[in-house]
Image (cartoon, rainbow, N blue to C red):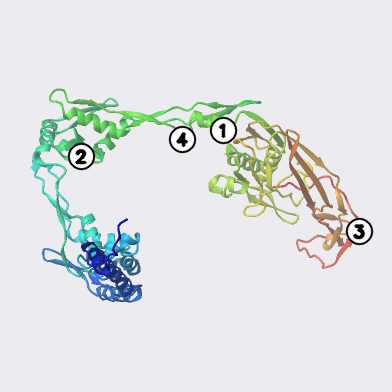
Amino acid sequence: MLNQQPISKKRRTGTPGFWALIAVGAIILIVVLAILIDQAAYYNKVHAGVSVAGIDVGGKTKAQAVAAVQAVVDKSQTSPITLTAGDKKWTLMPADVGATMDVAGAVKAAMNITREHNIFTDIGTRWKLYFSKRDVALTGTVDQTKMQTFVAGIAKDIDVAPVNAALSIENGQIKVIDSVEGKGVDQATLSKKLVSLLEALHSTTVEVPVVVKEPAVKAQDNAEAQKQAETMVSGPVTVEGGGKTWSVTAEEIASYMSFKSQEENGVSTLVPFMDSTKLQPLLTEIAPDVATDPVNATFAHDDSKAWVVPGKEGEQLDSDATAQAITDATLKNGDRTVQVVTMKKDPDLTTAKATAMGVTTKLNSYTTSYNCPAARQTNVKLCTKYSTNVFLAPGQEYNFDQQIGPRTSARGWKLAPGIVGPNQLEDVLGGGICQVSTTMFNAVGGGAAGLKITERHNHSLFISHYPKGRDATVTGGGKNLRFVNDMTHYVWITGTSTGTTTTITVWGTDEGRSTVWQVGSFYGVQGMSKTTILNSSMKAGQTAVSQAGQTGKSLKTVRTVTANGKVIHNDTFISVWPMFPEVVIVGTSSSTTTTGHTTTTGHTTTTGHTTTTGGGPPSS
């Protein structure tokens, strides 16, 4: 076995491999030291080589970087951007458009350049920043409404609309008007440019971008329109209708002509036409000769049912269609005769509308009779005429006083007895109308009508020939009769009167209503007193009734209206008739000679004697 000699330590350390390891280790150590130094140097700071909107923020903490950038932003807020277009100038301050810059966001992005990836990528980024700088854009926002308003204001000062080629008529000749180019601000481009400058904090002068605006119609596009217009004014046109003719001269055609723009194959061109507005003088002259009036639908009835009498359509001039017909005629070289065009004209009340009103059935009818003087008969007939032939829509209220209108002699009313106060009758214009209002109350309030009553009053004097507890008085501007059509269809109220006998009928759709009246007995009866007035100018034993009296009493009347078994109205009408004393004049003179002089003593005597009468004086 051979003896091995130990290797010398000095020999091992002197080999090339050893020194290579030493070199690599040194390099690694230097790199690690450099990384550690870099990290230490920019701990919580923006790395060197980074800027925000051109502002160097390298080596600054976040707060320092924000302060540095904000200082520049604040300074830029006081520096305007100047816009120019020719000799016109405008200035824009950032505040004018509500510009705000996101300084904090930009600084955060600057700090994250060396912190947003893995450690190796971030180390590489740090290394590159020593040789190639990075700039972070500063972003912000503007108030778009304010920006649009600012840019639109500039456009208003600069924009010139293009002028389309056109045709004109001069002295009956067709003349060509050439087109003219326009110009306008490129508002989208300008807005984008201004936002960019605001974000760059760059105060500068900007040329407003202006673009050419081409006219939609050019001269060559109107060649056909020119040819058509020349044909139109080449001669007269004859218009026929309603058995008449009207001649329109070439000069008149030229004055009635207008042009409108119309697209043909994607090209906008002019089209000549007869303008119905300009033709109005001629059309107004023609219209009456070709028109027939429409006839409204009406209603008729017999004793049990009502029906619609159909209306008729009328004819009227169709101005637009006639103008077009005249246009078509002027475009011809041969026969230039045109027929007037008419169209149907509906009546205000068509047959269909009348049918939909549902007036078909007799719902209720009521009649009153009272023999009275001729003047009162005239008033009753007139009141019936004014108060009936009325259609009430669903929900509509009827107002009797308003419906018959003012009682004046000019409207035919006569003087006749009417109640004017407590136990007072006088001749008044319209005396007797309450016979009609009473008839109306019973017609609309009963039977299958059973309408909603909103106002009713009894007379102050008891009138025996009216239905007990169901009379209804009306005074001008005072007590009234009002009711509402609370059915789902229209009702038609008709009436006839001879002056003594008056009938009012309600027509509509039978909705299953029925009415029951319950009239009670008189209560609260107060005996009529008697007042005696002594008169020395009358012979003893002679008497004369100065004022008829009335027994006081009250009465309750209940009306129940049902519809298909359900109560829809349950009304109580209280009638009150006050007591009025009978006034009797008694003579006291013992002389057998009577003179023309009459004296009445102030002596009166009131007794407890009562008289019950079954009637009373005539009512209104």
* Dot placed on the residue nearer the N-terminal end, 3 or 1: 1
Q: Which mark is residue 260?
A: 2
Are the two marked residues, 3 and 4, in contact with CB atoms closer than 8 angstroms?
Answer: no
Comes first in the chain, label 3 or label 2? 2
Find the distance from the CA under tag 4 to the CA under tag 1: 14 Å
Circle 1 sits on which residue?
357
Mark 3 burial class by Cα count in 10 Å: few <14, some 14-19, many 20+: few
Along the viewing direction, whichever of 416 and 62 lies nearer the viewer: 62
Q: Secondary structure at mark 4?
A: loop
Residue 492 at x, y = what percent?
60, 35
Q: Is 347 placed left or right of 559 in the picture?
A: left
Measured Cα–Cα span from mark 1 to mark 2? 46 Å
Work out whether residue 134 can be spotted: no
Which callout, 4 or 1, points at the residue further toward the start of the chain? 4
Residue 188's x, y, as percent? 23, 55
> Which element type, helix, strand or loop, lies under badge 3?
loop
Q: Quadrant of residue 16?
A: bottom left
Comparing labels 2 and 4, the label whose residue is closer to the camera = 2
Q: Residues within 10 Å of mark 4 (few under 14, many from 20)?
A: few
> Marks 3 and 1, how far apart in space?
60 Å
Give the x, y percent position of residue 224. Answer: 12, 33
The residue singled out by tag 4 in the image is 348
Neighbours of disc 1 within 10 Å: few (<14), some (14-19), many (20+)? many
Vertical placement of 24 versus 500: above or below?
Answer: below
**Tag 2: residue type?**
Lys
